[in-house]
Image: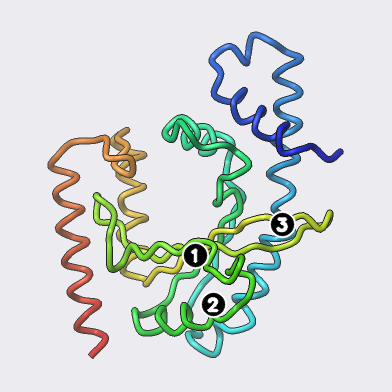
Amino acid sequence: MKFSKKDVVRAGKNLIDDDLLNDQEKFNSTMGILTYWRDSHLVPLEKSNQLLNRYIHNIDKNAFIAKRIKRLDSIKRKLQRFEKMELKNMQDIGGIRLVLSSQKQLDSMLKILTNETCFYKNNKLVKLDNYIKNPKFDGYRSIHIVGIFKNTDHDDRKIEFQLRTKLQHSWATTLEIIDIFTRQNLKSDNGFQNYKTFFKYVSDLFQLIESFKSF
């Protein structure tokens, strides 16, 4: 069954409603719409994977690709964190990550991708965030670029591409592991200050290493 954008928006609002579990009919309806919305990104996600595989082996034979559909708990946390966000506009329901050996190879891949029409709407990039030049508050570094792909119903779906070097990936993975084992949420700037300071300094140090490697 296909649902309207209004149905998707409503399901997103229901998902963060504390009373959802008390209404079985509403819960079932919401889960049905959420399942449809997540599944509608599967074909676009596969197309994004094919796009990367078309080029990556000519740039970096040691690169690796990981793809995923955003989990319901992650969708819920993001909707709670950003009050004005609607589920239909969330750009990373489908996400694909490309980890490359060096900054130089990452730059080469980004140049190729920005020549692809799927990353443009009305002759402008859909969205590109350069967290390498402008890292996040915690030191997170990566390139995020959003592409648009058709699904089986010929509807547009956005897929977020993340491009990282291996050092940047090691940093991000370590922070996520620390969050799990210490029950912090450093990714959202919630956690002990000593941890936040440590990861910020390590990110800066890794960036210096990346800069030296590019010479």
Q: Residue at x 18, y 60 (%)?
A: 202
Nearer to us in this view, 144 or 98: 144
Residue, disc 1: 145
Of the numbered discs 3 and 2, the one sitting upstream in the chain is: 2
Of the numbered discs 1 and 2, the one sitting upstream in the chain is: 2
Q: Is residue 82 left or right of residue 203?
A: right
Give the number of the mark in front: 3 or 2: 3
Q: Amino acid at mark 1?
A: Ile
Q: Position of residue 13 (x, y in %)?
A: 59, 26
Residue, disc 2: 113
Residue, disc 3: 156
- Sort mark 3 into few (<14), some (14-19) or many (20+) by Cα contacts within 10 Å: some
Q: Position of residue 137 (x, y in %)?
A: 24, 50
Q: Residue at x 66, y 28 (%)?
A: 11
- Give the spatial CA distance, label 3 vs label 2: 18 Å
Kindly indicate whether the residue at mark 2 contacts the one at mark 1 (C-beta within 8 angstroms): yes
Q: Amino acid at mark 3?
A: Asp
Q: Considering only vertical position in the picture, is 72 above or below 158?
A: above
